[in-house]
Amino acid sequence: MSQEINCFEIVQNLIDDCVEKLGLDRTVAEILREPQRVLSVSIPVQMDDGSIKVFKGFRSQHNNACGPCKGGIRFHPDVSMDEVKALSTWMSLKCAVVNLPYGGGKGGVIVNHKELSPNELEQLCRGYIRAIAPVLGADMDVPAPDVGTNGQTMGWMMDEFARYRGYNEFGVITGKPIIVGGSLGRVEATSRGCVFTIRQAAKATGLELKDATVVVQGFGNVGSIAARLLSREDGCKVLAVSDSTGAAYDPNGLDIAALEKFKLETGSVVGFPGSKNITTEELLQLECDILVPAALENQITGENADKINAKIVAEGANGPTTPEADNILAKRNILVLPDVLANAGGVTVSYFEWVQNQYGYYWTEEEVNERLERKMVEAFDSVYSLYKEHGDINMRGAAYMVAIKRIYEAMKIRGWLGNKA
Ligand SMILES: NC(=O)c1ccc[n+]([C@@H]2O[C@H](COP(=O)([O-])OP(=O)(O)OC[C@H]3O[C@@H](n4cnc5c(N)ncnc54)[C@H](O)[C@@H]3O)[C@@H](O)[C@H]2O)c1
């Protein structure tokens, strides 16, 4: 996360604004500005050479008024307590936007996981779970994968928690491989959810998706699958995609299936036959109907927002647009589908996985996708109608209002706000 822009302060400011707009007592903002609990842990790991290395990790539980805390575990060298706190706050908002019975949580370990052997990585996963186990549980706090973690790491973590409990508690972690209680459709869920919101936005704004032009920043899990679904199911023309090594552009539209194969074989999108190499900055400025930032935070900023040439920006990534850029895009009538809405498909199918674990009964992929569509359409409609009704807020403001109102109602009914508010 960028040094200059503190995401925790950004989300705190957005909460303040939103609580004021909703006309709620300041106490509501004071509660939501800080997580309810943040655990800081130190994890000693025996490395393959016999030495002991100590890693630092965190787990933040932002708010559990609506249900157990829910959110991923990030393994990255830039993890910090503030980043984890910000991400857990976003998770509370995201879960509330899609109306899931969850609050927000997030965890992280400061580590470059690529430098660890498989054995060292497994020991780190197990050590981290042992350290935070007292505050985990299917009805308390339910982690999932995030940047730097995946199905295998979730498998080790779930197993370590089963040793701690003395029995299997599959619902304690989501994003698991299918054989140990994972859900069908989870891998594509974030991108599929993003595509459902794009379809609703296209309907609302009269944009025809057949042959609509699309640009995707970040050809990873979220970006590549969103590109695949938009081209295959909606007939969109994906003009350009980028990854950390550069960008590939074809004004006639890229063959996404072939590009996915090329990226798998070469590790990069650059040099894809028939495409032109452009810089990642040029990619963001291409004229298109839909821009999907699906890489990192703070990509659309005050510096480049006036050069964005899209009708719709669908935030596959978390926090890709800075507040300054948000204002510029709003003034230019570019519709931004905010992260807490556009990438909420991942946590929604994580919720479905948790439900299936509690029942011990598993759904078909069609059932998962149908339920996901219903959730995403409902969420889009509630945010879009508030956005239209108000006139002085953007879609992010509307999403925050939907979310904070729900969390406020839960806190009020539980008596957390006393007689005030
Ligand atoms: N995976 C999920 O289910 C999920 C759910 C919600 C939100 N997100 C968010 O979506 C974003 C992407 O997550 P992911 O799981 O796809 O990660 P990923 O690591 O699979 O993909 C990220 C991609 O971005 C590329 N990238 C990095 N720096 C770049 C740059 N400067 N310009 C262009 N591309 C660059 C990487 O090369 C990679 O291809 C993150 O912000 C994540 O928090 C992911």
Image: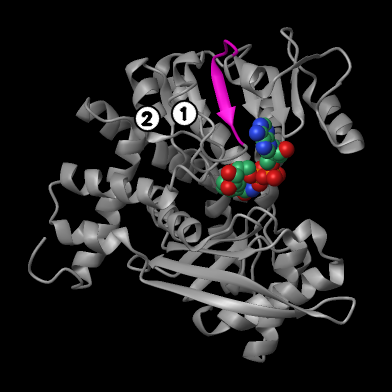
Front position in the image: 312 or 381: 312
The amino acid marked with disc number 2 is Glu
**Above or below: residue 377 compared with residue 59:** above
Confirm or deny contact between disc 1 and disc 2 (CB under 8 A). yes
Mark 2 crowd level (few <14, some 14–19, many ≥20, 10 Å Cα): few
The residue at 66%/56% (across/down) is 76
The residue at 61%/36% (across/down) is 294
**Above or below: residue 387 compared with residue 44:** above
For the question of whether residue 371 can be seen, the reply is: yes
- Highlighted magenta segment, given as a residue range: 286-294
Residue bearing mark 2: 324
| Element type at mark 2 | helix
Front position in the image: 373 or 107: 107
Q: Which mark is residue 301?
A: 1
The amino acid marked with disc number 1 is Thr
User: Real-space Cα distance between discs 1 and 2?
Assistant: 7 Å
Residue 281 placed where, x, y %? 62, 21
- Quick one: label 1 or label 2, which is nearer the N terminus? 1
The residue at 72%/34% (across/down) is 244
